[in-house]
Amino acid sequence: MQFLRDLIEAVVPTAHAEEAEDVEDSVAAEEEEEDEDEEEEEQADPMDALREECKNTPACHPFDHHFQHCVEKVLKQQEEDDYHSKDYKEDCVEEFFHLEHCINDCVAPRLFHKLK
């Protein structure tokens, strides 16, 4: 009988469970991961701040004004009852690209000096 058991154990692999980790160790590891996540979140993207600054410059203000005006106009049109039946539905793509072009021209030379 022992021979048969030894033969079966040799042919069929046996998996053993690992020892359970201490709860304190796993909690400490989770806290370290959360601290790392918080550190990553604290680092703000300098491009976002630069984009906002550039959007408010006198050079980009007219483009922002035209874009906002277009957005308001489109929203008013969407509220109309016959909006879905209209052949032409205005969008603000052109105004958006003019604004983005202005912002990007302002941000590009200043951004790389702020990156580490």
Image (cartoon, rainbow, N blue to C red):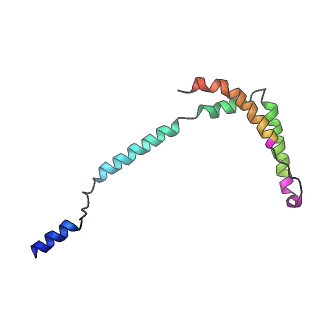
Name the residue: 18% across, 66% down.
10
88 falls in the magenta region:
yes
Q: Outermost residue, bottom direction?
A: 1
Residue 98: x percent and y percent? Answer: 79, 35
Residue bounds of the magenta highlight: 77-93
Residue 54: x percent and y percent? Answer: 71, 29
Looking at the rendered image, the quarter that the N terminus falls into is: bottom left
Work out whether residue 1 or residue 114 is closer to the camera in this orientation and state it. Answer: 1
Q: Is residue 67 visible?
A: no
Work out whether residue 22 or residue 110 is closer to the camera in this orientation and state it. Answer: 110
Name the residue: 14% across, 69% down.
6
Name the residue: 44% across, 40% down.
36
Compared with residue 8, is residue 40 higher up or lower down, i.e. above or below?
above
Residue 108: x percent and y percent? Answer: 67, 27
Q: Is residue 112 visible?
A: yes
Q: Quadrant of residue 64?
A: top right
Compared with residue 10, is residue 61 higher up or lower down, i.e. above or below?
above
Name the residue: 88% across, 53% down.
88
